[in-house]
Structure formats: structure tokens, C-alpha cells
Image: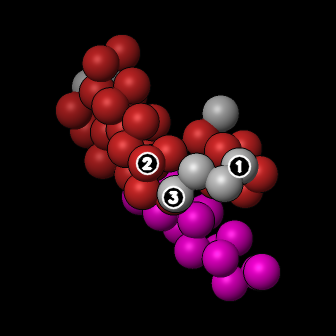
Amino acid sequence: MATYELCRCPTPPAVGINEAVELAKKFSTEDSGRYINGVLNTIARSHANAR
């Protein structure tokens, strides 16, 4: 969902990433939040460069 939000919605990337990280922390482990943050930051940068 976060990837779709980053690529297709006008939501600021930081907001979408933060929401996904908080969900990962809530439903998984603390390490999952850091992993999700890294992956989504990479996707956000790639998408910004592609524009």
C-alpha cells in the first residue's frame, strides 16, 4: 500500500513512509520498521528521480 501511495498519490513521501513504519512496528518487530523505512526511502528516491 505504501508503494502505491508513494508513486500514485499526492501524499508527501515522509507521511506515507511514516505510516508504513508505524504499522510495521505495531504488527511486527522494531527491526521491521527500520527495514520498511529503508525500502520505502529507496523507492521514493527512485520515483522522484524518474519524474
Q: How crowded is mark 3: few (under 14 residues within 10 Å), some or many (20 or more)?
A: many
Q: How crowded is mark 2: few (under 14 residues within 10 Å), some or many (20 or more)?
A: few
Residue at mark 2: 15
Residue 48, percent across and down? Answer: 65, 76
Q: Farthest residue toward the top? A: 27
Which three-letter amino acid code belongs to the residue tagged 3? Pro
Q: Is mark 1 on a helix, strand or loop?
A: loop
Residues at discs 3 and 2 in contact (Cβ within 8 Å): yes
Residue at mark 1: 9
Magenta-colored span: 38-51
Front residue of this view, candidates 32 and 49: 49
Q: Distance between the residues labelled 3 and 1?
A: 9 Å
Does any portion of residue 49 appear in the rendered image?
A: yes
Q: In this view, does 31 lie to the left or right of 8?
A: left
Residue at mark 3: 13
- Quarter holding the N terminus? top right
Front residue of this view, candidates 36 and 45: 45
Residue 27, percent across and down? Answer: 36, 15
Residue at x 77% of width, y 81% of height: 50
The colour style of the image is secondary structure
Residues at discs 3 and 1 in contact (Cβ within 8 Å): no
Q: Is mark 2 on a helix, strand or loop?
A: helix
